[in-house]
Image: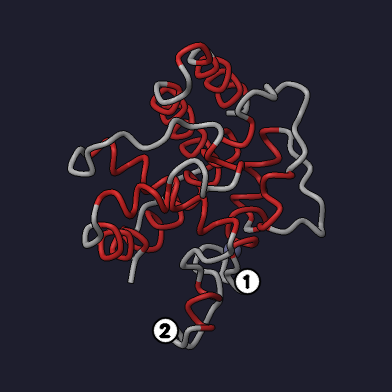
Amino acid sequence: MCFLCIYNLVFDKLPRNLYQGFLGQSVIPSFLGQSVRAPIGNPTNPYSKAILVLQFFGWLLISDKIQSRVNLQKRKVLEEATCELCQHQPETSLHLLFWCPAAANFWRRLGFLVPSDFDVGELHHLSRLPHIPDLHFETFVLLCCWQLWKRRNGVVFRGEEATVIQLLQNCKAEARLWACRLPRADAALGDVWCSIFHQAM
Ligand SMILES: [Zn+2]
C-alpha cells in the first residue's frame, strides 16, 4: 500500500481535531514542527492536506517507518527488498535517501558530506553547510528528502526517468511553495533555497 493510501486511510477517517493534535507542533519533533506553520484548519483544502502529508512524512522518516522495501519486507508485504532504482542494495530508508547513487549524487552536488555512520533517525542532526542558512535548516533537509521520496515513487510506480538535475529543479520549485508556509518574516528564505538548488544543477 502506498504512502498516500495509508495517509488517506488514517487521516480521512479521523475526526479533524484528533489528527490535528497528532500532527500539531507540540507532537512533531523539532525536526519539522518548529519550522513550518501548523496545518491550517480545513482538511478538505488540498493545500492543508499537502502540509499534513509532509508533516506525517517527516514523522515517518525520523521514525524509520516510511514504506521502504526493507520495511515492507519486515512486515512480510514483500519477499524481496532490493532497491528498484539501483538494483544493488537493500532499500532501507537510509539507502534510498542518502546512499542510492542518485541520492548520493544529489547530496554531493549540494555540498553535503554525509557521514558513513549516519542514521535516518538523526536527520535533524545532519551537519549544516556554511552556504545554507541555519534558519529553518531542518525544513530544508525535509524538503530534500521529500523530493527524493517523490522521485523514487515516480520512477518505481510511474516509470519516470527523473535525472538528478530534474530532481534539483523540482526542489527549487518546491522551495518557492514551501517558503509561503514559513513565518512571514522568513519568507525570503525561499529565494536563498532556490539559489542553492540552482547552483547545484
Ligand atoms: Zn538504490
Which colour style is shown? secondary structure
The residue labelled by disc 1 is 88
Q: Position of residue 11 (x, y in %)?
A: 28, 58
Residue at 39 percent of width and 49 percent of height: 21
Query: Which residue is nearer to you in this view: 197 or 3?
Result: 3
Query: Which residue is nearer to you in this view: 140 or 45?
Result: 45
SS label for mark 2:
loop
Q: Position of residue 84 (x, y in %)?
A: 49, 68
Q: Which mark is residue 32?
A: none
Q: Which mark is residue 77?
A: 2
Q: Nearer the viewer, mark 2 or mark 1?
A: 2
Indicate the quadrant where residue 135 lies. top right
- The crowding category of the residue bearing disc 2, from other C-alpha atoms within 10 Å (few below 14, some 14 to 19, many at least 20), is few
Amino acid type, residue under disc 1 in the picture: His
Q: Earlier in the sequence, mark 2 or mark 1?
A: 2
Residue at 48 percent of width and 20 percent of height: 183
Amino acid type, residue under disc 2 in the picture: Val
Residue at 52 percent of width and 44 percent of height: 26
Indicate the quadrant where residue 109 lies. top right
